[in-house]
């Protein structure tokens, strides 16, 4: 299994990269996370099944 965390500066960008990864076989793990006070970062953990 592979694990990555996607990071973007906006919700629209996060939606875009998450959907691209879903098309490539990645699966969101849990909900998205927001961090920041004046400048926000948005995170989404993703997993992908591998043969190994």
Image (cartoon, grey):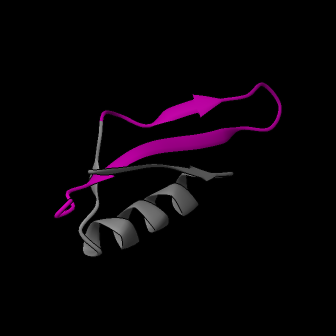
Q: Position of residue 38 (x, y in %)?
A: 83, 31
Q: Position of residue 7 (x, y in %)?
A: 60, 50
Q: Is residue 51 left or right of residue 45?
A: left
Q: Quadrant of the C terminus?
A: bottom left
In the current view of this chain or complex, which residue is farthest to the front? 52
Q: Is residue 18 above or below residue 39?
A: below
Front one among 18 and 26: 26
Q: Position of residue 47 (x, y in %)?
A: 30, 50
In the current view of this chain or complex, which residue is farthest to the right? 38
Residue that appears at 68% across and 51% down = 9
Q: Is residue 11 left or right of residue 50?
A: right
Residue that appears at 21% across and 61% down = 50
Q: Is residue 29 left or right of residue 10?
A: left
Q: Is residue 34 magenta?
A: yes
Q: Position of residue 35 (x, y in %)?
A: 65, 29
Q: Is residue 43 magenta?
A: yes
Q: Which residues are magenta?
A: 30-52
Q: Is residue 30 above or below residue 47?
A: above
Front one among 12 and 50: 50
Residue that appears at 30% across and 33% down = 30
């Amino acid at each position: 299994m592979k694990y990555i965390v996607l990071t973007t500066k906006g919700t629209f960008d996060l939606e875009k990269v998450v959907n691209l990864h879903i098309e490539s076989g990645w699966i969101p793990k849990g909900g998205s996370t927001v961090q920041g006070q004046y400048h926000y970062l948005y995170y989404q953990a993703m997993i992908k099944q591998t043969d190994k």
